[in-house]
Image: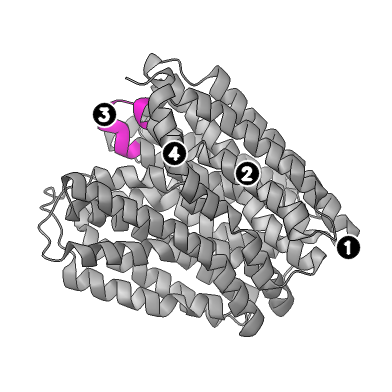
């Protein structure tokens, strides 16, 4: 469900897409909605299914963390490459390729006889999502122009919010009534329809001569660095602690990150992550805010359903429904906050939003084994959703204003990738929740909640001290 609050940044990629002639643009819109919904909903539904998966496949705490992180890892590190591949080889073909890989991964998840099989299949899903997400938005942006494009993007955004709201509840019901494997099988007919619509009705615009080199080395180094750092954070936070081997892997991850930055600097404008973006202090501040805030949010959406099911005896359906306030409030309040940011600038909402989110995390300290939804869970989720609605649209506006016009597409995509990486790192750091039992489960959950509140406060500090150094971020033009 993190995706639902990051769609505004992804939409900017669609707006920058080249146009093509489409005889049935409404069916292109349907293909885009179906394809992107696969990736958006899968994460939140799997969060609800973690307790059942752990029981059935005898998974420990680290295993459950990897069920989440082996989806987010390739998605985070290959997202920009997926968009570049689509630009070079054709967005429709790469969209169909991504959906196909995601569908095969879903089928393998459902057929998993052990954790190793499931983890490999989740990795395949993440690879597919990295190729389908940017290209589903690109084909949508290319099918419409002018005011019609704005309306189509609005329909796509509303559909994303609706699927984000329905997904966990439907997933919880499927887990309770059929079993956790059903949450992966339901992806298959949706993927088949999306592929049929894409092949039948999506047309690509004329593309470049194909001589622009792809940053394969950058993607490989980013993936390897994230993998090493995520593994070391997961292992170091587990029962084994920070052994010499874990520290060595962490050091390798840091070294690979350094090599990645050196490589991207040498590639200049051909880089997957142009270093020129970071010449803007505002962009640096916005990147830090995104990492901290969406990291805290990603951890919340993993741990809340897990704790409610494992510690408070909620059913899967009830735990999924407990997340409903988040997408519903976000969808309702974000347009108004976007309009407000247009009048007062982005800086004020980006300071206030993290503070409201932090207050919502503090309210989650009231969740215990007897937690009732309306008195303990709902107020916290409502406050966090209100805080995030202050941030989603203004953050996109600020990111685009913080860089030169030629870098807006890359900056938006990078900001979206950072949001996903933040959730992955936070889940790894706070994974002790998965290992705790009984009363200790709520103690670990409360520690995680306090850490998320601190991260949200720090995001507000970033907004106050680093963002708005350009007047156009403080006041509307």
**Residue 178 lies in quadrant:** bottom right
| Label 2 secondary element | helix
- Indicate which label's residue lies in the foreground, 4 or 3: 4
Q: Nearer the viewer, residue 88 or 284?
A: 284
Q: Which residue is mark 1?
A: 438
- Indicate which label's residue lies in the foreground, 1 or 4: 4
Q: Which residue is mark 4?
A: 336
**Magenta stretch: helix, strand or loop mostly:** helix
Residue at (47%, 26%) from the top-left corner? 284
> Is residue 300 highlighted in magenta?
no
Q: Are marks 3 and 2 in contact (CB under 8 Å)?
A: no
Residue at (71%, 62%) from the top-left corner? 306
Return the x and y of residue 187 as percentages of the image width and height: 44, 75
| Label 3 secondary element | helix
Q: Which residue is mark 3?
A: 405
Task: Specify the label residue 384 is tagged with.
Answer: 2
């Amino acid at each position: 469900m993190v995706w639902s609050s990051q769609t505004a940044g992804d939409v900017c990629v669609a707006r920058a897409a080249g146009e093509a002639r489409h005889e049935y643009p409404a069916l292109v819109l349907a293909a885009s909605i179906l394809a992107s919904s696969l990736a958006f909903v899968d994460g939140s539904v799997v969060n609800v299914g973690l307790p059942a998966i752990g029981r059935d496949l005898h998974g420990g705490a680290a295993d459950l963390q990897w069920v989440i992180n082996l989806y987010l890892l390739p998605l985070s590190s290959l997202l920009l490459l997926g968009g570049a591949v689509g630009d070079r080889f054709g967005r429709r073909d790469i969209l169909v390729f991504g959906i196909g890989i995601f569908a095969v991964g879903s089928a393998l998840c459902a057929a998993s006889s052990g954790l190793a099989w499931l983890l490999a299949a989740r990795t395949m899903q993440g690879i597919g999502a990295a190729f389908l997400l940017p290209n589903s938005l690109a084909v949508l942006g290319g099918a419409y122009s002018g005011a019609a494009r704005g309306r189509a993007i609005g329909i796509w955004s509303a559909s994303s919010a609706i699927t984000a709201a329905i997904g966990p509840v439907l997933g919880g019901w499927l887990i309770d009534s059929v079993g956790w494997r059903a949450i992966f099988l339901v992806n298959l007919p949706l993927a088949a329809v999306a592929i049929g619509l894409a092949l039948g009705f999506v047309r690509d615009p004329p593309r470049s001569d194909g001589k622009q080199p792809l940053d394969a080395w950058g993607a490989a180094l980013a993936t390897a660095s994230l993998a090493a750092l995520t593994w070391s954070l997961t292992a170091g936070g587990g029962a084994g602690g920070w052994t010499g081997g874990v520290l060595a892997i962490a050091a390798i991850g840091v070294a690979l990150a350094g090599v990645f930055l050196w490589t991207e600097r040498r590639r200049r404008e051909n880089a997957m992550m142009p270093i020129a973006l970071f010449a803007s202090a505002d962009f640096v501040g916005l990147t830090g805010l995104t990492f901290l805030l969406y990291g805290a949010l990603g951890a919340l959406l993993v741990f809340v359903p897990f704790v409610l099911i494992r510690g408070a005896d909620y059913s899967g359906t009830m735990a999924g429904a407990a997340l409903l306030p988040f997408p519903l409030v976000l969808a309702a309040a974000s347009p108004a906050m976007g309009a407000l940011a247009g009048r007062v600038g982005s800086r004020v909402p980006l300071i206030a939003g993290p503070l409201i989110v932090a207050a919502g995390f503090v309210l989650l300290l009231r969740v215990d084994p007897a937690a009732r939804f309306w008195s303990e869970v709902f107020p916290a989720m409502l406050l966090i959703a209100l805080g995030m609605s202050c941030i989603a649209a203004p953050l996109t506006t600020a990111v685009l204003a913080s860089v030169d016009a030629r870098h807006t597409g890359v900056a938006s995509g990078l900001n979206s990738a950072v949001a996903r990486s933040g959730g992955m790192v936070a889940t790894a750091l706070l994974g002790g929740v998965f290992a705790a039992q009984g009363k200790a489960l709520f103690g670990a959950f409360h520690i995680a909640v306090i850490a998320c509140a601190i991260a949200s406060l720090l995001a507000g500090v970033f907004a106050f001290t680093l963002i708005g150094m350009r007047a156009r971020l403080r006041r509307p033009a």
